[in-house]
Each structure stands twice: as structure tokens, then as C-alpha cells.
Image (cartoon, rainbow, N blue to C red):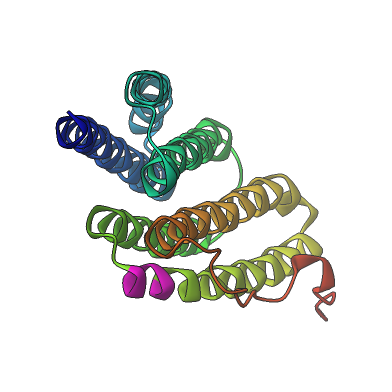
Amino acid sequence: MKPHTLSAFDRDLEAIRLAVLSMGGQVETAIMDAARALETRDEDLAARVVERDRTIDATEEEINAQVVRLLALRQPQADDLRSAVSVMKMVGELERLGDYAKNMAKRVPVLISAPVIEGAAGALRRQSRLGGQMLKDMLDAFARLDTALARDVIGRDVEVDDMTNALFREFITHMMEDPRNITPCLHYVFIAKNIERMGDLVTHGAEQVIFVTEGRKAEAREKGHSTATIAQPEV
């Protein structure tokens, strides 16, 4: 009877893991579409990103319900319990990533009517692309329980932090040069900070891969300089 129970748990958990990967793909698309809408000033694409976030939210609820049923029916122990609980944490991170993509898309209509900050949207799209690649690799690490890839993802978070700091300096300079730039630059600052937080969430997901596989927390990670310490640029 016990082997049958274990086999049933593995089968159910694998189905849940596939659902998580599908949700991750939806979030990855949302991030890149939001960044593209920002760069191309595509209000329709931004609206679709906002609308699709409902599907991401619904997927999180369904996966969590599946995990709760799994825990109730199979009553897993030790490693199996750790795997199930980590899935719930993972989908929580993915749902928040979707929210950040939605928030980026919501700023597109406002920025369309604001003064153009040359190169800003393209820079944010590059930052988003870096975060999106981290997400893709984190999901691959999750699918294969690849701790080496998970640690590589964690190490790349400092690149997102450093890019955020560079963008903050650039936006501050634009605001100091012309007061008309303040409104759009403030929106860009919020977007850059949200993308930085996306990197943090992806890193947390990679840390979950290490926790599930090795049964211990990931090593302390390097962080870029805090945006709170950015010096005021000279103009």
C-alpha cells in the first residue's frame, strides 16, 4: 500500500509542478509584453497585459487549492512535504511578479501623454529582459531541480540592482535639467524599482529550488548598492 501512496503523491505533485511552469510562462510573457508596450507606447498591448493578470491570479488560486488537496489526501512527510510547501511559495512569487508586470503596463497610458525621455523606455526594456531571462532560468532550475543553475540565477540579481541604480541616476539628471521631465521620470523610477523587485522575487524562487533539493537555505547573496545611497548627480 505504501509504494502506491508514494507513487500517487509523485504523480499528483508532478501535475502541480507542470501547472507552476505553465504559470511561470504566462508571467514571463506578461513581463516582456509590458516592457514592449512601454517602449512602443502600445496602449492596446498594455491593456491586454492588465487583463491577462486575472488569469495569472486564478492560476495561483487553483494551484494552491491543488496543493492543499494533495496535503490532505496524501499526508506527505519530510522531503515530500517540503516540496509541496515550496510550490505554494513559488506560485506566490509568480503571482507578485505578474502584479509588477501589470503595474508597469498600467503606467503606459500616462506616459504616452507625457514628455518623451529619450532612451528611457528602451533601457527599462533591457532591464526587463534581464529579469525575464532570470525568470526563465529559474523555472528551468525548478523543472530540473538544478541547484547550479539556481545559484547562477541568484548571482545575477546584482546585475539588476546595478542597472536600477544607473537608471535612477539618469532619471534624476533628467528631472534636474528640466522640471517638465519630473512626471515621466517619476513613473520610470517606479517601474525600474518594480523590475528590481522582480529580480528579488525570482531570486527567492531560485532559493526555493535549493531548499527543496538540499534541505537547507541558500547561501547569503550579494546585493547591488541600495538606491537610497545614490549620490545626487552634478549638472
Residue at point 52% right, 69% down?
Answer: 157
230 is higher (above) or lower (below) than 65: below
Residue at point 40% right, 75% down?
Answer: 152
Residue 158 percent across, percent down from the top left: 56, 74
Residue 209 percent across, percent down from the top left: 40, 58
Quarter location, residue 76: top left
Question: Residue extending furthest front?
Answer: 1
**Does residue 8 belong to the magenta stretch?**
no
Q: Along the horizontal axis of the image, is 111 left or right of 228? A: left
Residue at point 71% right, 71% down?
Answer: 169
Closer to us: 141 or 180 = 141
Q: Along the horizontal axis of the image, is 5 left or right of 48? A: left
Closer to us: 141 or 200 = 141
**Does residue 148 belong to the magenta stretch?**
yes
Residue at point 34% right, 75% down?
Answer: 148
Closer to us: 137 or 146 = 146
Q: Along the horizontal axis of the image, is 122 left or right of 230? A: left
Residue 186 percent across, percent down from the top left: 71, 49
50 is higher (above) or lower (below) than 99: above
Magenta span: 147-152
Residue 171 percent across, percent down from the top left: 68, 63
Dominant secondary-structure state across the stretch colored magenta:
helix
Closer to us: 127 or 199 = 199
Which part of the image, by quadrant, shows the N terminus?
A: top left
Which part of the image, by quadrant, shows the C terminus?
A: bottom right
Q: How many marks?
A: 0
Question: Residue extending furthest bottom?
Answer: 234
